[in-house]
Image: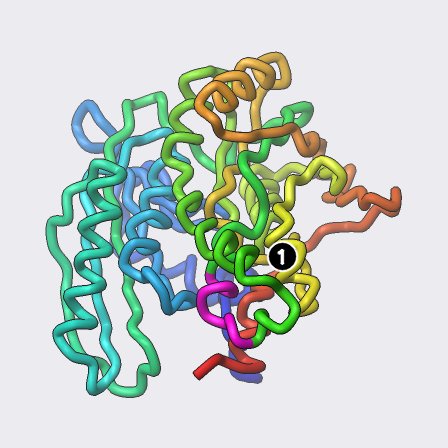
């Protein structure tokens, strides 16, 4: 069997070689590992604990700050407030105390932004690493009966997307590959692209959507971009969808960088945007609530029966079937070159 490529492990391998191994049965587990579900739910007295973990491996800049936010996002997608954060900080050989303290300062800053306590973790120097890796673990608490999953989308629901696609991927590319991009993209555009990282949190997006009512499922697209995120939500919910490319917001910085690097923005790492499957009668209320707080949002498609397929309607009117993509566009760039 060939070796894995950089990026997510293929879904069929997860189903065969990862998800069956669940350890001891525990009746308190409401939701464990499955495709499209990024946080576990554990019965805990009158509440429900929300647990998630996610490493940051594709960014060299602000890695600690990003780790807190991407893990907080997964908890927020459950309709819960993130509360406690732990992390493993793995450093390359010859890294000094300055690198470690910088990462921890980033973690502290991000944790304060989302009102989270940093409660533990582990630090070590690890042989074979070229750059630091931070594996984060976030916990939160949801109200019993009020949590949200990725598997609750229903046919006829609207698919709502907040902000724009490729937010995290655009920021990473601008920060890590400036020498490659500068000949064709001006400095102001690159600066704006780097600043897109400040949009990475969807904690407020999720909270406002749930408060508005009618939310059946939420999911934040990360590796594999928007299309992978929509596919994962649909796979978890056992439904189909029709998504319209003309309704999908893409910032000019993302378009320019993807054009220069020949990347598909629809498959570019998209932490920072939130997918919401909601009762169409509540969509307007959700959109109004988000927009009042300065969060752009739009209905980009419709949930359908699984038998109707999973479709992207292009700006040219062409209909394409959407399948899983285990490989983010970002990794193509990492494998081709890295600025010194």
Instruction: Name which quarter of the figure residue 67 lies in.
Output: bottom left
The answer to whether residue 47 is seen in the rendering is yes
Q: Secondary structure at mark 1?
A: helix
The answer to whether residue 223 is seen in the rendering is no
* Image quadrant where one finds the N terminus: bottom right
Does 332 sit above or below residue 81?
below
Give me the residue at 54% from left, 14% from top. 285
Q: Which residue is mark 1?
A: 267
Instruction: Name which quarter of the figure residue 211 lies in.
Output: top left
Instruction: Name which quarter of the figure residue 199 lies in.
Output: top left
Percent from the top left, x then y, of residue 274?
Answer: 50, 38
Give me the residue at 56% from left, 52% from top. 166
Q: Is residue 321 left or right of residue 112?
A: right
Q: Nearer the viewer, residue 306 or 119?
A: 119
Does 311 sit above or below residue 61?
above
Does 230 sit above or below residue 211?
below
Magenta run includes residue 178: yes
Give me the residue at 51% from left, 25% from top. 216
Magenta run includes residue 226: no
Q: Nearer the viewer, residue 65 or 303?
A: 65
Q: Main secondary structure of the magenta part?
A: helix
Magenta region = 172-179
Local crowd size for mark 1, using a 10 Å CA cut-off: few (<14), some (14–19), many (≥20): many
Q: Is residue 81 left or right of residue 230?
A: left
Percent from the top left, x then y, of residue 18?
Answer: 42, 63
Give me the residue at 82% from left, 44% from top. 315
């Amino acid at each position: 069997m060939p070796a894995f490529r950089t990026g997510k492990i293929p879904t069929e391998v997860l189903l065969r070689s990862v998800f069956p191994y669940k350890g001891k049965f525990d009746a308190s587990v409401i939701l464990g590992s499955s495709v499209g579900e990024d946080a576990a739910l554990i019965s805990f007295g009158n509440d429900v604990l929300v647990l998630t973990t996610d490493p940051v491996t594709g960014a060299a800049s602000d890695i600690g700050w990003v780790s807190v936010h991407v893990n907080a996002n997964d908890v927020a997608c459950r309709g819960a407030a993130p509360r406690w954060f732990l992390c493993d900080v793995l450093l390359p050989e010859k890294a000094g105390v300055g690198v470690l303290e910088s990462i921890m300062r980033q973690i502290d800053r991000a944790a304060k932004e989302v009102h989270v306590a940093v409660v533990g973790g582990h630090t070590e120097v690890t042989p074979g690493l070229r750059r630091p890796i931070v594996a984060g673990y976030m916990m939160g608490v949801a109200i019993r009966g009020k949590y949200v999953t990725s598997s609750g989308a229903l046919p006829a629901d609207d698919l709502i997307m907040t902000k724009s696609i490729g937010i995290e991927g655009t920021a990473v590319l601008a920060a890590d590959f400036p020498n490659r991009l500068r000949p064709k993209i001006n400095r102001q555009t690159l600066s704006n692209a780097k600043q897109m990282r400040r949009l990475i949190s969807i904690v407020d997006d999720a909270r406002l959507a749930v408060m508005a009512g009618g939310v059946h499922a939420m999911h934040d697209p990360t590796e594999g971009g928007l299309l992978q995120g929509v596919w994962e939500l649909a796979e978890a919910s056992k439904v189909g969808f029709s998504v319209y490319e003309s309704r999908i917001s893409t910032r000019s910085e993302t378009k320019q960088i993807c054009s220069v690097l020949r990347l598909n923005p629809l498959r570019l790492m998209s932490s920072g945007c939130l997918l919401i499957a909601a009762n169409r009668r509540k969509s307007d209320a959700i959109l109004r609530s988000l927009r009042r707080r300065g969060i752009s949002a739009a209905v980009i498609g419709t949930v359908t029966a699984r038998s109707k397929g999973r479709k992207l309607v292009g700006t040219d009117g062409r209909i394409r079937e959407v399948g899983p993509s285990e490989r983010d566009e970002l990794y193509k760039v990492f494998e081709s070159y890295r600025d010194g």
